[in-house]
């Protein structure tokens, strides 16, 4: 399911970020898989071999028309997986010049870049390739060191929540609490005192320090609560960490089998990107697609603020309402500021946008937040939706939390 969702998302993401048919898909785009694998996945339970996420990226590039401006960059450190990747490409896309694809980037005109190297070395190469709108997928066996997230983000996102770069980050959530012996991961300890940890627990704590790039997570997660509670806190804490670089972060849960849970963290500074992601996930996992009633909500907004809305009739809507509705409908966690792309589409003047946000704050729909990031010196006021006020005055409830599909139980 993860690969199917990503395959669909890759297609939709490219269709939008390339400019679409109206612009003949002429905008430069790149999909970068930093743990590409072999491009195929074998499903032991069914005996099937299906395209992996990198396989879907190659299908998009090599099986579709109008993808000349799309680059697919596949990084795989394991030599056996890299050889398998080349073998799959030779079998399925014989027209691709693999010698060029794995050769120097400066001499590669295929649009496919195969890098057999560590992520650290690959980033040096990737920095020299013009990427355009880019989607980075970090898909390790267990977790991505924070330093690798930082290095890519710092090179790509050079101003406050700048769009044009998105991350998808894999995290095998449950393994931290039940252990994963094959990867040498012991369950995290339930006490914060380091003196109480055995050697294996020390190693697991050290790995999670590496995941977060700091130690402040320990107090929140090294507790005697249930694994479910600690897992929820891990997801929330990692989401906050990713907010350093992204205004919107959506943890999408997957449950491949009983007792096992992982998340894909979708990270974007572009409202449509997040909306698209959640729609694909919701359709595949049978979650409700969030669709509150705009007409009924605006009628209640007019009744609650008659002096403010008395000049607006028919389909005419005040800017404050348009921005409020955009936050309700499309902004993950109800987060917004004057630099949101969809707000710019409503009004070019930032001062007018700020006045609208301040009006919504006065009405109580938005509360001012402390910045979620210290990555750049030029932050702007950040606001968060107050769902209690939205529900009270507009009759709209927040979207339900995303739930994974339960694994299928084999028929005996």
Image (cartoon, grey):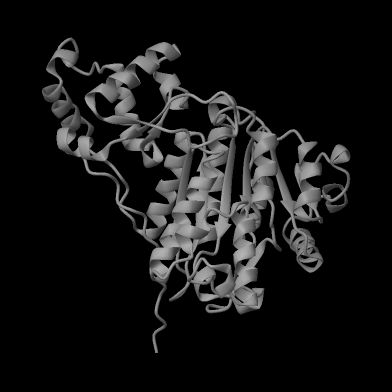
Q: Report the residue that reaches farthest toward the bottom.
A: 412
> Residue 311's quadrant in the figure?
top left
Observer-nearest of 306 and 66: 306
Q: Residue at x 28, y 23 (%)?
A: 360
On screen, residue 199 above or below 108: below
Q: Is residue 65 left or right of residue 327?
A: right
Q: Residue at x 40, y 62 (%)?
A: 404
Q: Position of residue 332 (x, y in %)?
A: 40, 41
Residue at 75% across, 58% down: 76
Quarter occupied by the C terminus: bottom left
Q: Is residue 243 visible?
A: yes
Residue 348: which quarter of the image? top left
Give percent across and percent down for residue 176: 54, 68
Residue 300 vertical position relative to residue 52 in the rendered view, above or below:
above
Tell me which residue sits at (58%, 78%) in the image. Answer: 44
Residue closest to the eye, 315 or 256: 256
Q: Is residue 409 above or below residue 64?
A: below
Report which quarter residue 310 is drawn in: top left
- Look at the image and tell me whether residue 42 can be seen: no
Can you give x and y, in whole percent of width and height, for residue 248 in the image? Answer: 47, 40
Pick the front one: 355 or 257: 355
Residue 3 coordinates in the image, percent (x, y): 55, 59
């Amino acid at each position: 399911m993860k690969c199917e969702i990503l395959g669909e998302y890759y297609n939709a993401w490219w269709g939008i970020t390339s400019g679409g048919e109206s612009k003949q898909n002429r905008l430069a785009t790149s999909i970068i898989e930093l743990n590409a694998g072999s491009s195929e996945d074998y499903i032991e339970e069914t005996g099937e071999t299906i395209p992996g996420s990198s396989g879907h990226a190659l299908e998009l590039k090599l099986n579709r028309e109008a993808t000349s401006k799309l680059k697919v960059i596949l990084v795989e450190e394991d030599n056996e997986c890299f050889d398998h990747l080349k073998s799959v490409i030779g079998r399925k896309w014989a027209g691709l010049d693999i010698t060029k694809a794995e050769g120097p980037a400066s001499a590669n005109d295929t649009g496919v870049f195969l890098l057999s190297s560590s992520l650290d070395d690959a980033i040096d190469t990737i920095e020299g390739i013009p990427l355009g709108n880019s989607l980075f997928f970090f898909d390790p066996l267990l977790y991505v060191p924070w330093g690798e997230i930082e290095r890519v983000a710092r090179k790509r996102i050079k101003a406050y929540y700048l769009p044009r770069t998105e991350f998808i980050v894999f995290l095998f959530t449950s393994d931290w609490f039940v252990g994963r012996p094959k990867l040498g991961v012991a369950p995290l300890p339930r006490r914060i005192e380091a003196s109480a940890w055995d050697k294996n627990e020390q190693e697991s704590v050290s790995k999670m320090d590496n995941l977060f790039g700091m130690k402040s997570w320990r107090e929140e997660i090294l507790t005697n609560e249930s694994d479910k509670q600690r897992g929820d806190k891990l997801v929330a804490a990692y989401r906050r960490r990713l907010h350093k670089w992204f205004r919107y972060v959506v943890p999408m849960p997957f449950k491949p089998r009983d007792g096992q849970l992982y998340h894909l963290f979708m990270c974007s500074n572009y409202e449509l990107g997040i909306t698209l992601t959640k729609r694909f996930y919701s359709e595949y996992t049978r979650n409700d697609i969030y669709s509150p009633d705009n007409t009924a909500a605006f009628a209640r907004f007019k009744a609650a603020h008659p002096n403010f809305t008395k000049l607006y009739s028919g389909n005419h809507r005040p800017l404050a309402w348009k921005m409020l509705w955009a936050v309700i409908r499309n902004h993950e966690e109800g987060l917004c500021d004057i630099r949101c792309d969809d707000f710019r589409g409503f009004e070019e003047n930032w001062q007018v946008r700020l006045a609208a946000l301040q009006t919504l704050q006065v009405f109580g729909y938005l509360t001012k937040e402390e910045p979620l990031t210290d990555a750049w010196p030029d932050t702007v006021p950040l606001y968060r939706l107050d769902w209690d006020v939205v529900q009270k005055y507009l009759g709209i409830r927040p979207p339900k939390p995303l739930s994974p599909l339960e694994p299928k139980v084999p028929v005996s």
